Image (cartoon, grey):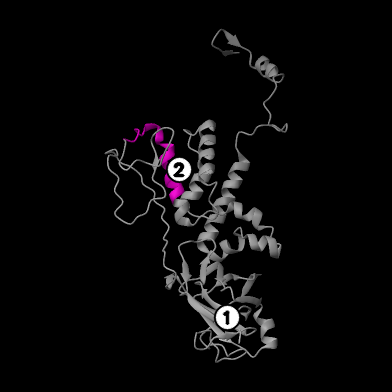
Amino acid sequence: MRSAAVGHQCVECVNEGARGIRQPTTAFGGRQANVPLATYVLIAINVAMFVAQTVAPEFERQFFLWPNGVAHYDQYYRLLTSGFLHTGITHIAFNMIAPPMWTKQRKQQARDRMSKLMDDAGSLSTQENLWLLLAFTSMIGAETTPELHAAQPAATVVSKNGRAAAWVDRKLENDLVIKGLNQSALTFLMQAEYSTSEVDTDRVDRGFRIERVVKNLTDATRVGTPNAPLKLGDQLLITYRLNTRKLQNFVALEDALPAGVEVVNPNLALVGKFYQLPPPDPQDRLLGLSYSEMRDRSALLYFDTVDPGSGTYSILARATAAGTFRWPATQVAPMYDSRFSGLSPSSVCVVSAD
């Protein structure tokens, strides 16, 4: 016998009665465990993957979600392994830790609001992900934030609770000044896009330097200038020289060709079988092409890896229409890191029908 809240209880009687009580089960009929073993195993896998990608950058490149690798190289494992990779310590912390204050309803609200933020995001860099995390932090604590005062100029968009505002489609020709906002601490996020009305484009080096060299394989004296125009049918070897100081992964190069020039073959090895190519620079190395797209008005080249230093790749094109055409700048950038990019200067191409 043992003492109870009312009177005494027989231990054997209590145990016998407990055997007839239905035990809670999971959705699939299994017994509920006191220790969430599956959760701990998933956390351990995520942490191990994060340590591996931090220590060895090559590990992340091998298991990153690369659409071209899945579509063209049958690397379907990336669909699974990419789910265990994280962009930083904040990313993995938000995924692995769920404070007790986050009720199920609040988690769902946070997920919905984050999903709405990322609906229009095609490819986010690390910096853009950081901005989203800052916005997420602001949303979590929005309940205690006072409503914003009316400001001049008036905000273009104001949130339903009046605690967030946006000024969109504004030109930053002068200093950006907003008057009348609250005196308390505020969080600001700004995204800007540089544009110019100039037709000519100057060189832009942001971690990448790109040069475009055009060689006329039919007649080297015809270089496409007004004094030495190309002729219809001329075969052109277009060489792109890339220079970077750090290892770059999954790099895309796009050259919008002038209207009078079209791509014949982006396969350099095949071009070399039929044309006498100029000798390469000893200091340059040939870039390994992973994928290309042939279009009438543009050359699209993709490289898995661009090592530090100088590297080149060439394609074959042909002059197909007479006239004076503007040749836009060639642009190069890593597909998953917007911090780096490069532009070559634009030029003019003259094709003669004579």
Q: Is residue 325 left or right of residue 169?
A: right
- Whole-Å distance between the Cαs marked 2 and 1? 47 Å
Residue 148 in the image, given as x and y percentages of width and height: 34, 36
Quadrant holding the C terminus: bottom right
Q: Residue at x 62, y 74 (%)?
A: 289
Residue 134 painted magenta: yes
- Res. 78 in view: yes
Q: How many marks?
A: 2
Residue 296: name its quadrant.
Answer: bottom right
- Res. 211 in view: no
Decide which of 164, 304 is in the foreground and name it: 164
Is the residue 224 above or below the residue 64 in the image?
Answer: below
Count neighbours of disc 1 (C-alpha within 10 A) and say few if under 14, some if 14 to 19, many if 20 or more: some
Residue 181 in the image, given as x and y percentages of width and height: 29, 39
User: What amino acid is found at the position of numbered circle 1 in the picture?
Assistant: Ile
Residue 224 in the image, given as x and y percentages of width and height: 53, 84
Which label number is shown at residue 136?
2
Residue 318: name its quadrant.
Answer: bottom right
Q: Secondary structure at mark 2?
A: helix
Name the residue carrying label 1. Answer: 238
Q: Residue at x 56, y 69 (%)?
A: 254
User: What amino acid is found at the position of numbered circle 2 in the picture?
Assistant: Phe
Residue farthest top in this picture: 7
The residue range painted magenta reads 131-149
Is the residue 168 above or below the residue 223 in the image?
Answer: above
Q: Secondary structure at mark 1?
A: strand
Residue 221 in the image, given as x and y percentages of width and height: 55, 92
Residue farthest front in this picture: 354
Chief SS of the magenta region: helix
